[in-house]
Amino acid sequence: MGLCPDRSKCLASAGMHVVFFGDSHAHSLIRALAKGSGEEDLIAVDVRRIKDGRANAKEIPGDLARAFPAEAVFCCLGGTEYNLLGLIESPQPFDFLLSPGDAVAPERTPVPHGLVRAALASRMRSSLARMADVRAQYECPFTCVAPPPPFAELDATVNLPRAFVPHLDKGIAPARLRLKLYNVQLELLQAHCRAEEITFMPAPSNATDDAGYLRREFWDKDPTHGNARYGQSVIEQIRSSQFA
């Protein structure tokens, strides 16, 4: 199964027991399932497009559990906040300490870790609230899925999402900084999950290189999202979890 815009058909799908909810990051699973991976009891849903299959609505529908009955829910709403903060080089290039053994690049302005953490937490507030709206509708096990990690460097065959293109005059921020921002976002996600007693699932280990960047073969048309191969890796993770 893939995206299910026809709610009557979804209601008739009593056999499905695993549902993955997301925004743009849901499409790696939607594409993997559309290729016929044999996962008949798993459905991936872009929550923005439930109402008519096209509109990017941010409001979470109030009848998800009825439309998409599940024995386990996996959720990745938002996920690109670290890119919004640091994908494009800022007018005043900055860096920060991620850990005590870390170092700040000498040519960049040092920023307190707490300030970076607060800025990311503010950007994540909306997606965490939407995840809470989804969770409130289910009594089954609930898992928060990490977004794909950042890419190390661009090549000539890919493009960035259109929203970033008008701001590229300063170029792309260094990979090391973007990976640090991603790790701060993961720290915030994990802290939230611990506080809310939600299971956290990291990005698939086979999709990252030794440094932690998203491997080239798992990029979608733009490198900030995973492709169908990435989605299949997430499906395999879900299948190997305690809720499989």
Image (cartoon, helix red, strand yellow):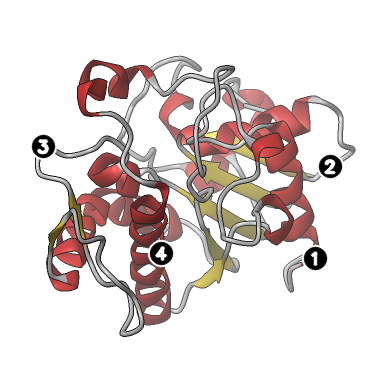
Q: Is residue 132 above or below residue 192?
A: above
Residues under labels 4 and 1: Cα distance? 24 Å
Give residue 46's position: percent from left, percent from top: 51, 32
Residues under labels 2 and 4: Cα distance? 31 Å
Determine whether, in the image, residue 97 is placed left or right of residue 69.
Answer: left
Label 1 or label 2, whichever comes before in sequence order: 2
Q: Which quadrant of the structure image shows residue 85? A: top left
Front-lying residue, 8 or 24 = 24
Label 2 or label 4, whichever comes before in sequence order: 2
Residues under labels 1 and 3: Cα distance? 44 Å
What residue would you read off at disc 1? Answer: 240
Judging from the image, what secondary structure is the residue with disc 2 in? loop
Q: Is residue 14 above or below residue 111?
A: above
State yes or no: discs 4 and 1 in contact (Cβ < 8 Å).
no
Judging from the image, what secondary structure is the residue with disc 3 in? loop
State yes or no: discs 3 and 2 in contact (Cβ < 8 Å).
no
Mark 4, Cα crowd under 10 Å, few <14 / some 14-19 / many 20+, is: some
**Looking at this rendering, what residue extends furthest in the right direction?**
38
Disc 3 or disc 2, which is closer to the eye? 3
Disc 4 or disc 1, which is closer to the eye? 4
Q: Is residue 107 above or below residue 190?
A: above
Give the residue drawn at x 21%, y 50%: 123
Label 3 or label 2, whichever comes before in sequence order: 2
Give residue 164's position: percent from left, percent from top: 30, 24
Residues under labels 4 and 3: Cα distance? 23 Å
Residues under labels 3 and 2: Cα distance? 46 Å
Residue 11 makes an appearance in the image: no
Task: Identify the disc placed on residue 39.
Answer: 2
What residue would you read off at disc 3? Answer: 91
Residue type, numbered disc 2: Glu
